């Protein structure tokens, strides 16, 4: 923790107030990817709120940051990122020198690797680039349905409206074994989405709710499919 605190101080000194840098939206940043890895050479920064945590073993080496225009993944070599960033922390990130590459239908940012590979940043490098500028009182959440999901929703917090859990009544997960649970659109029943649940979560032994509900999570991409990362059952709102 002492290393992290020292790193934060160094990071704030290096990042400064962003004077002279162009502030881009997340969408403008990610749109720079044109099908092959590219290193950012101009001084640009992005500002957004953290929407991911690795506390339960998911999101390993990844910091997901969103603004109202979209989201991005920053690859960081650290297995305790939750000690550094909490969901809702607002960050300013300097992007010059980062390489932006493709990942499924989305993009991620890190260091240039071999071929199409993107390497993780060292923790020290991340700390010099990122600066905490506040905490969001209320996270931006984009309402949508399974059938209207697109790459524009990736790595952002969404609320999937009007769905049912296929395994309602079951426990969420067995201890230490992560699992995917399926939600089905209540009207368009061919529209389905996997909801990723960590076997290390505090709620793994609770029961999956029944009935039509709205589910809040962060949209990810894995195995050529979208998946929703669920942080808490408190973010499932069962309709009356």
Image: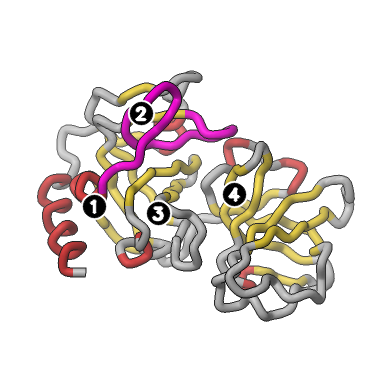
Q: Are marks 2 and 1 in contact (CB under 8 Å)?
A: no
Of callouts 2 and 3, which one flags the residue occurring earlier in the amino acid sequence? 3
The x and y percentages for residue 91 are 31, 52
**Where 237 sits versus 113, above or below?**
below
Does residue 118 appear left or right of residue 213 in this picture? left
Between the residue at mark 2 and the residue at mark 4, the CA separation in whole angstroms equals 25 Å
Between the residue at mark 2 and the residue at mark 1, the CA separation in whole angstroms equals 25 Å
Instruction: Name the quarter where the C terminus is drawn.
Output: bottom right
Q: Judge the density around disc 2: few (<14), some (14-19), many (≥20) Cα neighbours within 10 Å.
A: few
Q: Is residue 105 magenta?
A: yes
Q: What residue sits right under mark 1 in the picture?
A: 131
**Where 121 sits versus 83, above or below?**
above
Q: Nearer the viewer, mark 4 or mark 3?
A: 4
The image's mark for residue 219 is 4
Between the residue at mark 2 and the residue at mark 3, the CA separation in whole angstroms equals 27 Å
Q: In what element is the residue under mark 4?
A: strand
Q: In what element is the residue under mark 2?
A: loop
Q: In what element is the residue under mark 3?
A: strand
Between the residue at mark 4 and the residue at mark 3, the CA separation in whole angstroms equals 15 Å
Q: Is residue 140 magenta?
A: no
| Residue at horizontal 56 percent and vertical 43 percent from the top | 154
| Residue at horizontal 67 percent and vertical 69 percent from the top | 236
Q: What residue sits right under mark 2 in the picture?
A: 113
Q: What residue sits right under mark 3 in the picture?
A: 49
Of callouts 1 and 4, which one flags the residue occurring earlier in the amino acid sequence? 1
Q: Nearer the viewer, mark 2 or mark 3?
A: 2
Which residue is nearer to you in this view: 45 or 202?
Answer: 202
């Amino acid at each position: 923790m002492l290393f992290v605190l020292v790193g934060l101080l160094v990071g704030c000194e290096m990042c400064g107030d962003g004077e002279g840098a162009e502030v881009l939206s997340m969408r403008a940043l990610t749109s720079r990817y044109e099908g092959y890895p590219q290193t950012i050479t101009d001084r640009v920064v992005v500002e957004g709120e953290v929407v991911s945590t690795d506390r339960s073993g998911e999101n390993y080496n990844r910091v997901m940051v969103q603004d109202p225009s979209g989201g991005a993944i920053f690859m960081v070599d650290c297995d305790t990122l939750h000690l550094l960033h909490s969901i809702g922390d607002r960050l300013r990130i300097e992007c010059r020198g980062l390489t932006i590459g493709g990942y499924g239908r989305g993009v991620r940012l890190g260091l240039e690797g071999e071929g199409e590979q993107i390497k993780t940043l060292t923790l020290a490098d991340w700390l010099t680039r990122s600066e905490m500028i506040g905490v969001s009182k209320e996270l931006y959440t984009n309402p949508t349905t399974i059938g209207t999901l697109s790459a524009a929703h990736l790595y952002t917090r969404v609320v999937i409206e009007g769905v049912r859990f296929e395994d309602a009544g079951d426990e969420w997960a067995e201890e230490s074994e992560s699992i995917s649970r399926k939600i089905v659109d209540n009207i368009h029943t061919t529209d389905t989405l996997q909801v990723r649940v960590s076997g290390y979560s505090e709620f793994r032994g609770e029961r999956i709710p029944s009935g039509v509900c709205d589910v809040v999570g962060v949209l990810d991409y894995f195995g050529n499919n979208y998946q929703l990362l669920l942080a808490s059952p408190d973010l499932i709102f069962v309709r009356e």
